[in-house]
Image (spheres, helix red, strand yellow):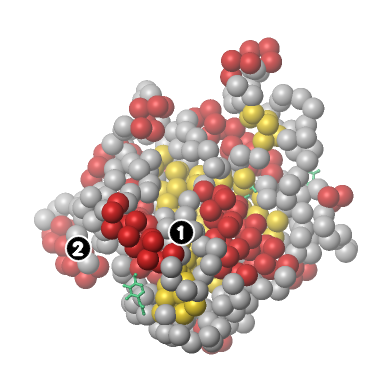
Amino acid sequence: MCSITKLWVLNALVFLLGFPFILCSIILPNDLPKHRSVRYIPGNRAEELHMMRQRRNAPPGRSDGSSDIIKPKVMIVAMFNLEADAFLKNYTPTLYGLNITIPGLSPRYPEVYCTTTGEVCHITTAEAEINAAASMSALIYSRMFDLTETYFLIGGISGINPNYGTTGTVTFPRFAVQFGLQYEIDSGQLPGGGGFGSRFFTQGTKQFKSNLYPGVLYGTEVFELNEALRKRAFLAANGAKLVDTEEAAKYRRLYTMPAARASPGVTLCDTGTSDTWWTGSVLAEAFGNLTILLTNGTGEYCTTQQEDNASLAVLVRAAAADLVDFGRVIILRTASDFDRAPPGVDELYHLLQAPQGGFAGAIANIYVAGVRFVNEIVTQWDGMYRVGIRPTNYIGDILNALGSPHGHVPDIGVEDQFFIPVMY
Ligand SMILES: *[C@@H]1O[C@H](CO)[C@@H](O)[C@H](O)[C@H]1NC(C)=O
Ligand SMILES: *[C@@H]1O[C@H](CO)[C@@H](O)[C@H](O)[C@H]1NC(C)=O
Ligand SMILES: *[C@@H]1O[C@H](CO)[C@@H](O)[C@H](O)[C@H]1NC(C)=O
Ligand SMILES: *[C@@H]1O[C@H](CO)[C@@H](O)[C@H](O)[C@H]1NC(C)=O
């Protein structure tokens, strides 16, 4: 294990020795899993159970006994323990300065952690859509926080589309699309033996056909984030010295796409949510198509994860209740693996066994890139972030639940289904 400072020294050494790669993760244990498929790893099960039972009995409230409302500048959102450790183990001042036990959080992660001043806080939601939505709701409706001026930085790992990036890459999406909200039919029972690539087609349509706009919208199909804020996050993260590994560098050379073969960087591209951990080029193409369809042509499917649309759905509802500002939400997704195999490599082998090597870099880079934006928000609070970064685009969901905030009419969705009619 090595600390950030040690890493810089090591880096310099590695550089001087002519080694192109950083061989150690800044943060984390040497026993990091090689594959994204091993996401939740209890270190010591007995110890974990003991801690969980202890925390379950902890009374709700602040560790310092105060009942004051905490008003954070930044709330960092992680989905599981290793993503959480990226910030919890490296951020200074410590995020263990003030612990808040909140009823309704995941039993695995029952506390929100904050710096002693409450300026920067951290929640771990637990994985996939149901956990993300339930934990975010518990946080917001606990009323232990005033989140009206808080920036939410949702920071986690993801699978990446090799046309847009590589393992270790840091991405900031404008759109988050929900892939799972579709019809699906088993491949053995496809009408006429298929017709197009995947078994998925949009809900509420009358035909088994690709690229038909859904006939029914539930409201969580697409969310659109503040473009001006996203660009600021991108600029803040862009100079970061990203962590990479030799194993990741080796595997990415199997791809033909230039973005997949390049070293990890920071990029602007969109994300998709699915509870199902899918893989392979056919589904990737289908979900790429769906992203274009649901974002009315502007979205570019780039990363895949299991939570964001759920967290965003909660934040849209909270924004409608004036409890958060939806213009202050940023998603940062780093790439731990590729969403499809390189040419000539079996998809199942790629998912389950291939030495993709991207996990350690992806975990480390949540912090390496994310902390630069967190620091920017905190240090430029007065005169910049307190008042907010005015959106230059439509923000919100596909049903216009927030009513064209800041005067931008929706560029997604179907007008006759909007909750709030558009005034022209
Ligand atoms: C907060 O929780 C962490 C992790 O359990 C612990 O190490 C720390 O001492 C706690 N801090 C306070 C102020 O109770
Ligand atoms: C999920 O949210 C993302 C990010 O805002 C959005 O681009 C995407 O369209 C959403 N997807 C679905 C299916 O809701
Ligand atoms: C994606 O859309 C194209 C048409 O734009 C279509 O030819 C192709 O079959 C679609 N792919 C999948 C997997 O649905
Ligand atoms: C988005 O595309 C759909 C399907 O083509 C269309 O009905 C809808 O009006 C478009 N929405 C906007 C806001 O342009």
**Mark toward the start of the polypeptide (2 vs 1):** 2
Give the quadrant of the C terminus: bottom right
* Residue drawn at (47%, 41%) of the image: 161
Relative side of 122 to 421, left or right: left
| Residue named by callout 2 | 2
Q: Position of residue 4 (x, y in %)?
A: 25, 68
Q: Amino acid at mark 1?
A: Pro
365 to 359, vertically: above or below: below
Q: Secondary structure at mark 1?
A: loop
* Residue drawn at (59%, 15%) of the image: 188
| Residue named by callout 1 | 107
Q: Position of residue 91 (x, y in %)?
A: 34, 72
* Residue drawn at (37%, 66%) of the image: 54
Relative side of 6 to 62, left or right: left
Give the number of the mark in front: 2 or 1.
1
Q: Amino acid at mark 2?
A: Cys
